[in-house]
Image (cartoon, rainbow, N blue to C red):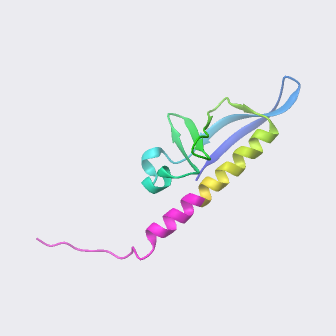
Amino acid sequence: MIKIKAKKIVYEGKRMYKITSISALRLQDLPAKYLKGHPHCYLANGHLIIRPEKNTLRVLEPGTILDPKEMAEVWIELAHCGERLRDINKKLRENWHGEITLKI
């Protein structure tokens, strides 16, 4: 799950969002297949790294200020990342259930 909290502020005479906290899965907690393709995102050292496309990178951290258009773009990018991760995890879990016992 990705969770971003932001405060609505007026900054330089404009309505903006200021990110106050971010929580997401870390790089080491994600499947390799997810990280090799796009879009993907992960948390690293308190920064949310978003890679919507191969040559596109967005980095968010607490204190980042975004206008409403940028915030909407972030929401869309994160939704795509989440959908892709869900699909990959679903395929990984297919026919992979039950348990085994090893006796030596």
Residue at image coords 68%, 41%: 5
- Pinpoint residue 12: horizontal percent, then vertical percent: 84, 22
Classify 7 as above or below 102: above
Q: In the image, 1: left or right of 71? A: left
Residue at image coords 64%, 55%: 80
- Which residue extends farthest right? 13
- Pinpoint residue 78: horizontal percent, then vertical percent: 65, 50
Q: Reply yes or no: does residue 91 show up in magenta.
A: yes
Q: Which portion, as a residue range, is magenta?
A: 84-104
In this view, the residue in front, 54 or 88, is 54
Q: Reply yes or no: does residue 92 show up in magenta.
A: yes
Residue at image coords 39%, 75%: 97
Q: In the image, 44: left or right of 51? A: left
- Pinpoint residue 50: horizontal percent, then vertical percent: 60, 43
Residue at image coords 55%, 65%: 87
In this view, the residue in front, 46 or 91, is 91
Classify 2 as above or below 17: below
Please count the marks in the image.
0
Classify 38 as above or below 68: below
Classify 104 as above or below 72: below
- Pinpoint residue 49: horizontal percent, then vertical percent: 57, 40
